[in-house]
Image (cartoon, rainbow, N blue to C red):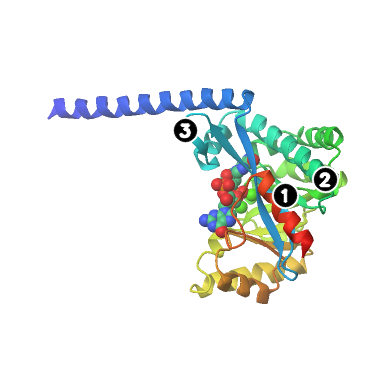
Amino acid sequence: SKDQGRGGIAYFSEEITRAIRERIALEARLRRAIGHQELRVYYQPQIDIASGRMVGAEALVRWQDPDEGLIPPSLFIPIAEESSLIVKIGEWVLRETCRQGRLWLDMGLPPMTLAVNVSPHQFRRSDINALVATVLAETGFPAGQLELEITESGLMANQDNATNILNNLHAQGVRLAIDDFGTGYSSLAYLKHFPLDVLKIDKSFIDEIPHNKDDMEIAATIVAMGHTLGFKVLAEGVETPEQLAFLQKAGCDVYQGYIKSRPIPAEEFAELLLEQQGD
Ligand code: C2E
Ligand code: CA
Ligand code: CA
Ligand code: CA
């Protein structure tokens, strides 16, 4: 009946209102969290496949909420992405990672490449070049040890500016990686126009190895073609010895994944490095 129909609409609009309220509240909490130093950077080791040694880490943000505990980025990065908050968060992660990286060097730990995610929103703003220059100067972290991860879709959405921004970052000596490769629509041939150093094969192609022959073929092809174009190739989301053996055979250069370690706090990463130094 008519009444029921209206009831349905009222119900949905209540739901929507609630969702919007929750979202605004979350945004406000997140804004406060940045000011109150509730964000943390965790580090996931990256391992050279041939030598088995750690060569770097990806910096991944977490939110240490006093009430709710450790909140994963999947619960707040998408919301941050839709406002300018992601720019603030990205800036903070970059500065914190470079500060930490400098500290590790000063402690005498072996030089590691530290990879920081750059959101499409951040990438659209051409002042990313100035920010990187400022943070490197401020912290004294070597440009050659900093790697910036840009997603394939972020690159595609900013084609006009992308070349200039990437050329400038490259000129600063920073390394550039394409994240989540294979999930967008760019071809390797297209990517060769950019000064990229690393291709990160998306986890979705690794997950079903060794059962999915298509994925194995795709992964091996990305490695081979990536090498032809002069890129280093990294596989992410490696969880099993079978996956690692396959990637080694395919000639993949570097991996990261739970098989070695989850993302861990800075102190734990430093401990892993000290252990490795002893070997
Ligand atoms: P991503 O950049 O693709 O990062 C890799 C994600 O895969 C991380 O999730 C990592 O913990 C997870 N991962 C790594 N190895 C494995 C594995 O073997 N198995 C499984 N199941 N997962 C694995 P995390 O830390 O939850 O981050 C999720 C996403 O949030 C990131 O995906 C990235 O898109 C975004 N993110 C995290 N930190 C930042 C940041 O500082 N800035 C921006 N813009 N985005 C960030
Ligand atoms: Ca990444
Ligand atoms: Ca990724
Ligand atoms: Ca991803």
Q: Secondary structure at mark 1?
A: helix
Proximity of marks 3 and 2: CB atoms separated by less than 8 Å: no
- For the residues labelled 3 and 1, the Cα–Cα distance comes to 27 Å
Instruction: Give whichever of 66, 258 is nearer the camera.
Output: 66
The amino acid type, in three-letter code, at marker 3 is Glu
Q: Where does the image place residue 259, in percent across and percent down from the top left?
A: 58, 63
- For the residues labelled 2 and 1, the Cα–Cα distance comes to 10 Å
Proximity of marks 2 and 1: CB atoms separated by less than 8 Å: yes
On screen, 274 above or below 133? below
Q: Nearer the viewer, mark 3 or mark 2?
A: 2
Instruction: Give whichever of 267, 193 is nearer the camera.
Output: 267
Q: Secondary structure at mark 3?
A: loop
At x 69%, y 33%, the residue is 92
Q: Which mark is residue 68?
A: 3
Q: Counting other residues with Cα less than 10 Å from the Cα at mark 1, is it few (<14), some (14-19), or many (20 or more)? A: some
Proximity of marks 3 and 1: CB atoms separated by less than 8 Å: no
At x 78%, y 61%, the residue is 278
Residue 227 makes an appearance in the image: yes
Locate the N terminus and report the quarter of the image it occupies: top left
Instruction: Give the mark nearest the N terminus, 2 or 1.
Output: 2
| Horizontal side, residue 13 vs residue 179: left or right | left
Q: Where does the image place residue 111, in percent across and percent down from the top left?
A: 82, 52
The amino acid type, in three-letter code, at marker 2 is Met
